Amino acid sequence: MGTWLEGKPVADRIREGVRAEVARYREEKGFVPGLVGVLVGENPASRSYLRMKEKACQSLGLYGRILTLPGTTMRDQLKIEIDALNEDDRVDGILVQLPLPQGFDTHEVISWIDPKKDVDGIHPVSLGLLLQNLPGLRACTPLGVLELIKSTGERIEGKDVVVIGRSLIVGKPLAAMITNENGTVTICHSKTKNLAGVAARADILIAAMGKPGFVGPEFVKEGALAIDVGSNAVTDPAVVRALFGGDPTREKEIQDKGYTWVGDVQARVIDKAAWLTPSPGGVGPLTIAMLMKNTLDAFKARRGL
């Protein structure tokens, strides 16, 4: 049986490093990094995510706030708001919470953000710098995945790595980051032939497709390192029982709240893998920790510190 790879200890180490640097800059310079989350509309999940990020800023000593705009906001007004944040010297990071309401072009909106303040790491300039392996801001979740892998002592260089999922937020930037670390990457997706067979050749398997319990033991090489990026709300106890066995905690959550969170990887993979991240509790804590670090890095880069 393998070892559960918990995200919190790694995230705590990163957060403490950010906290110490922010305190030093407050004392020496009299100002701190600033992050603004932009929320358009009233999506409860988006509001909850931004509130978590705002609390993380407060706990680490950063300046953080949420700019809330009504769902009726027009394209030109949103651009004016983002332009103002680009010009605001107190703001080092701008995070537009996705998904945006219908009618907005997400790629266009992201392109309005000053690349120096793109702490999500998905501006075309940020992605271009990543592909060239040049310094720049990187996507938070892929950065967190790299930190988790490195925390095990596992080397990426020379390893066969399979990433299931090709999103702009996780799969594509993560594949580029691993290539930059000299890993050999295969990106798999819904059109991949013999997906389980391809995945089972990986020394490091990363699941990021957003399908509850999609990855079972047949996808995993004996002794592999398995990273579960998935986070899926499931409302049916039968699905939990079928994919994750008798899990009374998750079934009680469904009973109490109407849903529970599960990953893309079945828990029984732990019997075959050397390492497996839990979901929740694995990659999740690293995403916000890396967002805080990105904001600090943007602050330092903008000021030549």
Image: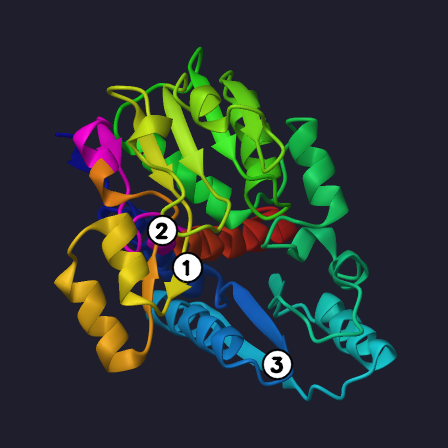
Q: How many marks?
A: 3
Bounds of the magenta segment: 269-286
* Residue type, mark 1 in image: Asn
The percent position of residue 58, horizontal first and vertical second, equals: 39, 73
Q: Nearer the viewer, residue 305 or 64?
A: 64
Is 66 rendered above or below residue 186? Answer: below
Look at 26% across and 37% down and name the residue there. Answer: 276
According to the image, label 1 marks what residue?
Answer: 232
| Eye-nearest disc, 3 or 1 | 1
Q: Residue 67 shows which numbered tag?
A: 3
* Residue type, mark 3 in image: Leu
Q: Residue furthest top?
A: 158
Q: Residue 263 shows which numbered tag?
A: 2
* Residue type, mark 2 in image: Gly
Looking at the rendered structure, the secondary structure element under dot 2 is loop
Colour pattern of the rendering: rainbow
Q: Nearer the viewer, residue 130 or 294?
A: 130
Determine contact: label 1, label 2, CB under 8 Å: yes
